[in-house]
Image: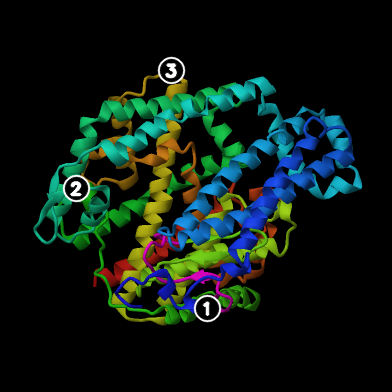
Amino acid sequence: MSEKQLLRNQVPENLTWDLSSIFPTDEAWEAAFDETRKSAQALSKYAGHVGDSADVLREALEADLAVERQFEKVYVYAHQIYDQDTTNQKYSAYNARVQGLYAELSANTAFFQPEVLALSNEKLDAYLATDGLKKYAHFFEVLKARKPHTLPAEQEALLAGASDIFNASEQTFGALDNSDIVFGDVHTETGEIVPLTNGLYSLLLESKDRSLREEAFTTLYDSYIALQNTFASTLSSHVKGHNFLAKTRHYDSARQAAVTANDIPESVFETLTKTVDANLPLLHRFVSLRKKILNVDDVHSYDLYVPLVDEINFEVTYEKAKDIVLAALAPLGDDYIAIVQKAFDERWIDVVENKGKRTGAYSSGSYDTKPFILLNWQNNLNNVYTLAHEMGHSVHSYFTRHNQEYHYGDYPIFLAEIASTTNEGLLTDYLLKTNDDPKFQAYVLNQYLDGFKGTVFRQTQFAEFEQWIHEQSAAGVALTADEMSTFYGSLNQKFYGSDLFPDEAIAYEWARIPHFYYNFYVYQYSTGEAAATTLAERILTQNGAEDYKNYLKAGNSDYALNVIKKAGVNMSQPDYLNEAFKVFEERLNEFEKIMLK
C-alpha cells in the first residue's frame, strides 16, 4: 500500500467492497428508497386492527417485517457508500436521507407492539396456535415477556416524550468530556510541550519514559478532580433516571430492567462478578510480574498500560494476512473456511485507506446483502487481528442468515462479540504454535494478557461499580464525589492488589468513564471475552467446532443463553469463566518463563 493516501477512485477494484451486489446503480437505490417509504405508509391500514383475527395479526406482522427488510437493504447501501468516502456530498445526502426514512418507518410501525400486548394472553395464545403463526412462536414469546413491564399507552407516550430529559445527563457528560474539559500541557516523546488530549493521553501511557507517563496521568486527573462535583452530579442524575424507569416499569432494580430487557437472567451478571472476584489473585500476579519487568519499587496506575515487550518487526501485507487468517481458522472446518474464502473472492471487504474514508473497522450488512467488512489496512500484526475479528462477525452473520428466516436472521449484542473474539483466540494459538522466536511469542502473549486484563477484569470492575452506585442511589444515599471516589479507590485496589500503589487520583477514574452512562452494558464485554477464550480452547482441544457452528447458525431463534449453550457454554454457571481463567493462567506462566529468564 502506498504511503500516500489515495483518492477513492484510485483504489484498485479488488481492494474495494462490491456494493453493486446490493443495488447495481444509484438509480436502483433511489427506486428502492421510494418503494420502502410507500410500503411503510401502507402499514397504517393495520393500525387499530392487529388483534381482529389470527390472519390479520399474521398479515400485519409479515407486512411489518417486509418493510424492515426492505429498509435494511436501503440503509446498508447508503451508509456504506457514504463511509467509503465521507467527502462525497451526494452520498452524505444519502446517509442523511436514510436516517430520516428510519424515523418515518419507526413512526409507521409504532402501533404494532402496543396492540399485540393489549391482547389477552388467552386470545394471543389462541392466535399463535394457528398454522400461519406457529413459526413466529419465539418472536411472540419474547414480546409477551415485555407485557408486565409495558405501561398503558398514555403513560408509554409520556415516557417516550421525556426521553430527552432522561438522556440529558449523558449528553451533558459528553459535552463536558469531549469538548469543554481542558487539560494542561505535557511533554511528548520528542520533547515538545503540547496540550494534552484523551488521544495523546492513551499514547503517553504506553511510553517507555516513566516521567512522561506520570506527567500525563497527573495532568489529566487534575482536570477531572477540579470538576469532580459536576461529574458526580451528571452521573448521579443519570443513575436516578435508571432507577426511576425501572420502578415505573415494575422491575425490582435497574439492573434487572437492563439485563432482562435483553432476555438475560441476572444470574449471568452475578456469576460473572463472583467468579472474577475469586480469580483476582491471577491479576495480582500479573501486576507483580509487571513490577519485576519494569524494575520499579511500586507499580503506579500510570504503569499499567506500558507494553512489557518492545514492538516486533512483523510487517505483514494484506495478502499474507489472508493466508494467516485462513490457516488460523482452519480448526473451524472446511465449511467455515469456504465462507472466509468467499469473503476474499467476492469482494466483501473494503481494504485500504483512502481520503475521506471512515476510520476504524467494522462488519456490516443486512439479511439480503453480503456481510461486508470495512478495514483501513496497515501492514502490522494488529491489523491481522482486526481482519480475523471482523471476519468472525461476518461469518456469524452469513451462517445465521443462511439458516434462519428473516424474523430470526439476526443475533443479540450479548452474543455478537463472542464470535469475533473466538477468532482472535484461534489466531493467538496459531501464532504461538507457528513461530518459536521467544521475542515474538512474548509479544503475542503480552497482547493477549493485556487484552484479557482490560476486558474480563477491568470491565467487571466497572460492572461492580455500576451495581454499587445504582444500589446506593436506590437506597437514598447521595452519590457525592467523595462517596464515589472512596468506593472506587477501594474497588480499584481490590482488583489490582497490593503491588499497585494507591494513587489518590485513580479514585476519580469514575468521572471519565462513559460506560457508566450505558446502563449495565459493560458486563457483556467480560462475559463475551471469557466465553470466547473458552470456546477457542474447546475448538482446539475438544472437537468443539461443530457445536460452535450450531451457535453461529441459531440467530434469534431462541434466547441468547440457550443459543450459546449450543456451543457448549452455560453462561449462568461459572465453568466457562473458570476455563477462561485457566487459559489466562497458562499463558501467564508461559510469559513469566520467557520474561524472567
Q: Label 1, on which residue?
A: 326
Residue at 53% in and 70% down: 17
Verify whether residue 37 appears in magenta: no
Amino acid carrying label 3: it is: Gly
Residue at image x 14%, y 53%? 212
Q: Which residue is at 44% across, 28% downward?
A: 239
Between 319 and 453, the one nearer to me in the picture: 319
Callout 1 crowding tier (Cα within 10 Å): few <14, some 14–19, many ≥20: some
Residue 170 drawn above or below residue 545:
above
Residue 444: quadrant of the picture: bottom left
Which of the two marks, 2 or 3, is nearer to us in this view? 2
Spatial separation of the CA atoms under disc 2 and disc 3: 38 Å
Q: What secondary structure prevails in the magenta region?
A: loop
Q: Residues within 10 Å of mark 2 (few under 14, many from 20)?
A: some
Q: Amino acid at mark 2?
A: Leu
Query: Would you place residue 557 above or below residue 114 in this image?
Result: below
375 with respect to 300 (left or right): right
At which x and y percent is residue 570? 61, 52
Q: Which mark is residue 196?
A: 2
Left or right placement of residue 91 versus residue 103 in this view: left
> Given the image, on which type of amino acid does mark 1 rest?
Leu
Task: Say which element carries label 3.
Answer: loop
Which type of secondary structure does the marked residue at label 1 adopt? helix
Q: Nearer the viewer, mark 1 or mark 3?
A: 1
Q: Residue 400: where, in percent of width, then height?
A: 67, 61
Q: Is residue 349 magenta?
A: yes
Look at the image and give the residue range highlighted in magenta: 344-361
Quadrant of residue 149 within the rendered picture: top right
Marks 1 and 2, how far apart at CA: 41 Å
- Contact, mark 1 vs mark 2 (Cβ under 8 Å): no
Mark 2 or mark 3: name the one nearer the start of the chain: 2
Q: Earlier in the sequence, mark 1 or mark 3?
A: 1
